[in-house]
C-alpha cells in the first residue's frame, strides 16, 4: 500500500512513517517544513532503513498534489499537515482556517481528481469541548472553544458531508488524545519551536536545563490532586493506530470515527513525578492560575477502536517518560538544522 502522508515530517507524521515502513507500507511525504526540519528524513531513514520520497510542498497546492498522487500511484492519504497551537490560533484565525480547513478541502479535491478515495484525518479530542462526563465516547456531542478546535470540527463536518455525497469513499476521523513520548531509539521526537505550549515538551526542557521551572496551570480543579487530568498516549501507539485504521477500515466505504487514547487519566503532578523517575532529577514547578480555556479532565473510552480495528495502546507511562527523556537528553536543542 502506497500512502501519501501530508505533514509526514512533523512529530506524529514522522513516527507514523516509521511504523508504516515496518508494516510493509510505502509512505510518500508532502510537507512544507513550516514546523519541521529536513533532517527528520535522515532520522526516518536511519531508524527504518528506508528513505521515503519527500516532496517539499504545501497541501494548498492542488496541481502539485494531483501530480504527486498520480505519479506515485498512491492508494490512500493520511492527512497530518496543519497548524496546531491553540493560543496562536486565537491570534491568527485566518492562518488556521486557511491551513487546516482550506488545506483539507484542496487536498480532497486533488484526491478526487487523482482517483484516490481513502483518507485518514488527524482530528483531536478538542472536538469534545468540555465533556459532560468521562470517559468520552465517539458519540458524545462536539463543540469548539477556539479557532484551532473549530478548524478541526469544521473539517470533520466537511468530510462527513462529502462522504454522504460520495458513499464509495472511505473517510476516517481519528480523534487523538494527548500524544507524548518519542521513538525508543532516541532519534526522533517532539521538537517545538519557541516556548512549548504542551506539558511534556515543557517538562523535558526544564529537565535538560533549557527552562527554569514548570508552571502548573491550576491546582483547584475537581480532580484527585487539583491539577488537570489527561489521557496521555505514546506516539508510537498513536502511529500504530493509523496503520490499524488503514488496514481495517481504510479500504471500506463509509465514515469511520475513532478515539485514539489509552482510557487512563493522569494528572499534571503524576506526569511530573513519572518524569522525575525517568530523568533522575527533580523538576522544579510552581502552582499558578488556571490557563484560560483548559478543562479539568479528559480521557477516552477506547473500546470502539479495540473492537473494530483490533488496536489498543500498549505502552506504559514509564515508556512515555523514558522515551521522551532519551530523545530530549540526546538532542537537547531538538533536530539539527542540517
Ligand atoms: P507538527 O506540527 O509536528 O506536524 C505537522 C506538519 O505539517 C509539520 O511538519 C508542518 O511543517 C506541516 N505543515 C503544516 N502546514 C502545512 C501545509 N499547509 N502544507 C504542508 N505541510 C504543512 O504537528 P503534530 O503534533 O505532528 O500534529 C499532526 C496533526 O495531528 C495535526 O493536524 C494536529 O492538529 C493533529 N493533532 C495533534 C495533537 C498533538 O497534541 N500533537 C493532538 C491532536 C491532534
Ligand atoms: N499544563 C501545565 N503547564 C504547562 C502546560 C500544560 O500545567 O506548561 C497542563 C494543562 O493545564 C493541562 C495539561 O497540562 O492540564 C495538558 O496540557 P497540554 O497543553 O499538554 O494539552 P491539552 O490537553 O491542553 O491540549 C491538547 C493538545 C491540543 C488539543 C487538546 C484537546 O495540545 O492540540 O489536547 O485535545 F486541542
Image (spheres, rainbow, N blue to C red):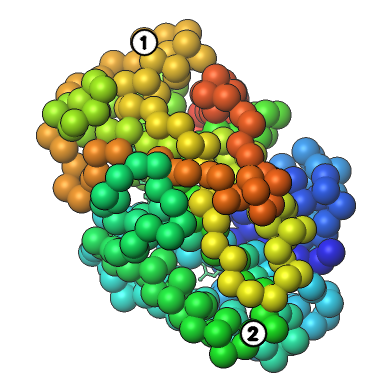
Cβ of mark 2 under 8 Å from ligand 1: the answer is no
Q: Which element type, helix, strand or loop, lies under badge 1?
A: loop
Q: Nearer the viewer, residue 142 or 91?
A: 142
- Depicted 110 relative to depicted 322: above or below: below
Q: Is residue 97 left or right of residue 115?
A: left
Residue labelled with disc 1: 282
The earlier-in-sequence mark between 2 and 1 is: 2
Task: Assign the N terminus to one quadrant of the image.
Answer: bottom right
Q: Which element type, helix, strand or loop, lies under badge 2?
A: loop
Residue lying at 69% horizontally and 76% vertically, measured from the top left = 253
- Depicted 118 relative to depicted 17: above or below: below
How far across and how far down the image is residue 246, in percent? 72, 60
Please rate how many residues cluster around mark 1, counting C-alpha atoms within 10 Å: few if below 14, some from 14 to 19, many from 20.
few
Residue 99 can be seen in this image: no
Residue lying at 67% horizontally and 88% vertically, measured from the top left = 112
Q: Is residue 55 left or right of residue 130?
A: right
Residue lying at 76% horizontally and 69% vertically, measured from the top left = 251
Q: Is residue 170 left or right of residue 130?
A: right
Residue labelled with disc 2: 167
In front: label 2 or label 1: 2
Please rate how many residues cluster around mark 2, counting C-alpha atoms within 10 Å: few if below 14, some from 14 to 19, many from 20.
few
Q: Report which quarter residue 326 is drawn in.
A: top right
Residue 32 can be seen in this image: yes
Amino acid at each position: 500500500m502506497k500512502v501519501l502522508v501530508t505533514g509526514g515530517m512533523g512529530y506524529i507524521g514522522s513516527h507514523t512513517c516509521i511504523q508504516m515502513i515496518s508494516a510493509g507500507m510505502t509512505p510518500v511525504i508532502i510537507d512544507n517544513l513550516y514546523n519541521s526540519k529536513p533532517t527528520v528524513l535522515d532520522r526516518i531513514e536511519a531508524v527504518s532503513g528506508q528513505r521515503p520520497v519527500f516532496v517539499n510542498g504545501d497541501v494548498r497546492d492542488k496541481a502539485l498534489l494531483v501530480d504527486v498522487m498520480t505519479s506515485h500511484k498512491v492508494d490512500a492519504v493520511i492527512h497530518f499537515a496543519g497548524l496546531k497551537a491553540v493560543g496562536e490560533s486565537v491570534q491568527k484565525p485566518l492562518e488556521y482556517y486557511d491551513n487546516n480547513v482550506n488545506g483539507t478541502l484542496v487536498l480532497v479535491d486533488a484526491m478526487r481528481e487523482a482517483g484516490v478515495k481513502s483518507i485518514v484525518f488527524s482530528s483531536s479530542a478538542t472536538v469534545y469541548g468540555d465533556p459532560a462526563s468521562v470517559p468520552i465516547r465517539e458519540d458524545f456531542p462536539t463543540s469548539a472553544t477556539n479557532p484551532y478546535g473549530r478548524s478541526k470540527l469544521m473539517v470533520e463536518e466537511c468530510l462527513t458531508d462529502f462522504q454522504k455525497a460520495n458513499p464509495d469513499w472511505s473517510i476516517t476521523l481519528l480523534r487523538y488524545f494527548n500524544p507524548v513520548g518519542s521513538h525508543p531509539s532516541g532519534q526522533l521526537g517532539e521538537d517545538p519551536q519557541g516556548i512549548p505550549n504542551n506539558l511534556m515538551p515543557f517538562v523535558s526542557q526544564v529537565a535538560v536545563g533549557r527552562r527554569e521551572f514548570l508552571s502548573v496551570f491550576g491546582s483547584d480543579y475537581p480532580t484527585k490532586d487539583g491539577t488537570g487530568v489527561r489521557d496521555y498516549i505514546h506516539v508510537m501507539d498513536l502511529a500504530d493506530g493509523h496503520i490499524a485504521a488503514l488496514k481495517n477500515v481504510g479500504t471500506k466505504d463509509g465514515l469511520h470515527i475513532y478515539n485514539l487514547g489509552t482510557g487512563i487519566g493522569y494528572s499534571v503532578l503524576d506526569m511530573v513525578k513519572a518524569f522525575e523517575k525517568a530523568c533522575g532529577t527533580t523538576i522544579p514547578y510552581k502552582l499558578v492560575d488556571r490557563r484560560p480555556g483548559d478543562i479539568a479532565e479528559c480521557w477516552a473510552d477506547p473500546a470502539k477502536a479495540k473492537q473494530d480495528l483490533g488496536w489498543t495502546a500498549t505502552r506504559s507511562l514509564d515508556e512515555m517518560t523514558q522515551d521522551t527523556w532519551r530523545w530530549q537528553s540526546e538532542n537537547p536543542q531538538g533536530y539539527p538544522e542540517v
